[in-house]
Amino acid sequence: MHDQFDVTLEDSDLLIEVELTTNLIIAASESDGVLSTEEIDRILGVVPVTAAAETPVEPES
């Protein structure tokens, strides 16, 4: 007989968020001070926007 409550739930986005949060918690607990924005970005894998990417592109006529 099939148990309707025997299901596997997995939310890949949630798992990624939990991993990122865990990495931040570990880094903060190992730090002697406040983490800088650059350190947080590195831990989260944030790629800085380059000046070229910030410049709007003019549409061709």
Image (cartoon, rainbow, N blue to C red):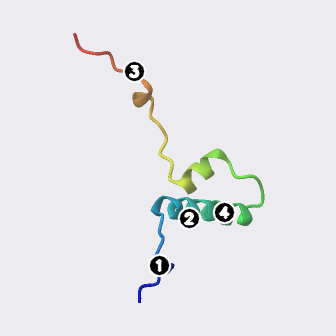
Amino acid at circle 3: Pro
**Which residue is rendered at x = 77% and y = 55% of the image?**
33
Instruction: Give the residue at mark 4.
Output: 27
Q: Is residue 43 above or below residue 29?
A: above
* In this view, the mark in front (1 or 3): 1
Q: Residue furthest right?
A: 33
Instruction: Give the residue at mark 1.
Output: 4
As drawn, is 40 to the left or to the right of 16?
Answer: right
- N-terminal label among 4 and 2: 2
**Which residue is rendered at x = 28% and y = 16% of the image?**
59
Q: Residue furthest bottom?
A: 1
Q: Are marks 4 and 2 in contact (CB under 8 Å)?
A: no
Amino acid at circle 1: Gln
Q: Nearer the viewer, residue 23 or 8?
A: 8
Instruction: Give the residue at mark 2.
Output: 19
Amino acid at circle 2: Glu
- N-terminal label among 4 and 3: 4
Q: Are marks 4 and 1 in contact (CB under 8 Å)?
A: no
As drawn, is 29 to the left or to the right of 8?
Answer: right
